[in-house]
Amino acid sequence: MAEATANGLGQHALDSARTHDATTTGFTPAEVHQEHPIKLYLVVWAWLFILSTCSYLVDYFGLHGYLRWSLILIFMILKAGLIVAIFMHMAWERLALTYAIILPPVLVLVFVTMMVFEADYTLLTRMAFFGAGP
Amino acid sequence: MAETTLAHIGRTEPRPAGWQGIAADWSSDQRAFKNVSWGKAMMWIFLLSDTFIFGCFLLSYMTARISTRVPWPNPSEVFALRIGGSDIPLILIAIMTFVLISSSGTMAMAVNFGYRRDRRKTAVLMLLTAALGATFVGMQAFEWTKLITEGVRPWGNPWGAAQFGASFFMITGFHGTHVTIGVIFLIIVARKVWRGDYDVGRPGFFTSRRGRYENVEIMGLYWHFVDLVWVFIFAFFYLW
């Protein structure tokens, strides 16, 4: 159980060993602590506010059809990207972790495709047996 | 550093980056996540599993909405609030979104001050995060009450497709539960920071393991995830 006991004891040694650009230069012996200027977080915060306002305005102005859906998706992806990359520090992690975490959720899109076909089929059978609508 | 299996050998040469780095990090007989602690890696993997849970909820909502012959209730009207004599669409949901994003901002700053060993600022920012989270849950309770008094039930509602209520209560209820659990843990971690547990390495009350300031960041990962899920719920359930 060397890991468990070393957790607290090694802390100060870890901190003194850390460097700011450790992740970009490659291998570091200890865990890397993320330290970035507060301004970065404030800028991201402001952007999240702007993007949320934009997606709200999509509904407020009552946009419809493909314009509405594509705008919603664009703002959603931008917001999610900012949160994961900056707030959750994914932008500074090694790719081994990034891909292990980001790739599996993307594969959910396969499931989405399958369920779109399935739901369309259900709708078709419902219309065939119950008529177009109540 | 007994913590890092590689480090005690004394290897210091730079590891490859990019695709070669992925292959090198995942190769056999070693630890795949080189510079993150197990606590952080396991939180990420937990969040990944949680992503699938919420993914399945949103998927079932999509399936229900596509496959029904009955028109789906218009969320823009369902969630409108009457303020000053006119209906403003989705206004409560928009405010909830801003509250949750603000809590994410304060959390990110708490993590930052934690690594700078600023106990006071870290604890205050975490408590502020918890307060914003509690506000969010309160507004959600208000929203639920409003919809329930208007007659929305998991098996039906006055405006359209019967599946609307089931999807709504399931998705927002599960998310609200996550926020509530997050608020509780934020308060616990904030208390530890305030007391200086992470400076003196005081054993935790549950696992008896010594905490570190990294725990603040791990807590932050969970909290940002809750915000992240809301981004998707907001887009797919409320705006679509």
Image (cartoon, grey):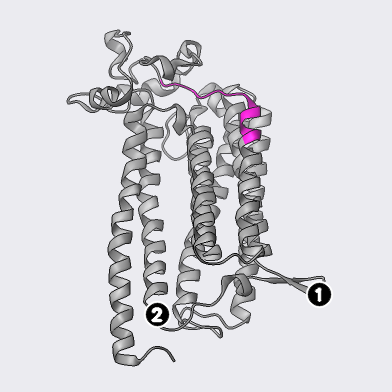
Residue under the image location 29 percent in, 59 percent down? A111
Separation of disc 1 and disc 2 at Cα?
34 Å
Q: Which residues are magenta?
A: A31-43
Mark 1 belongs to which subunit? B
Residue A42, given in percent of the width and then of the height, sits at: 66, 34
- Quadrant of residue B77 in the image? bottom right
Horizontal side, residue B145 vs residue A67: left or right:
right
Residue under the image location 36 percent in, 76 percent down? B67
Residue A54, given in percent of the width and then of the height, sits at: 63, 52
Which residue is the site of mark 1? B85
* Amino acid found under the numbered disc labelled 1: Gly
Whether residue A134 is visible:
yes
Residue under the image location 39 percent in, 39 percent down? B44
Q: Observer-nearest residue: A129 or B203?
A: A129
Residue A22, given in percent of the width and then of the height, sits at: 44, 16
Q: Residue furthest right?
A: B84
Which residue is the site of mark 2? B68
Residue A65, given in percent of the width and then of the height, sits at: 51, 66
Q: Observer-nearest residue: A42 or B119?
A: A42
Q: Is residue B238 magenta?
A: no
Pointer 1 local density, CA inside 10 Å: few below 14, some 14–19, many at least 20: few
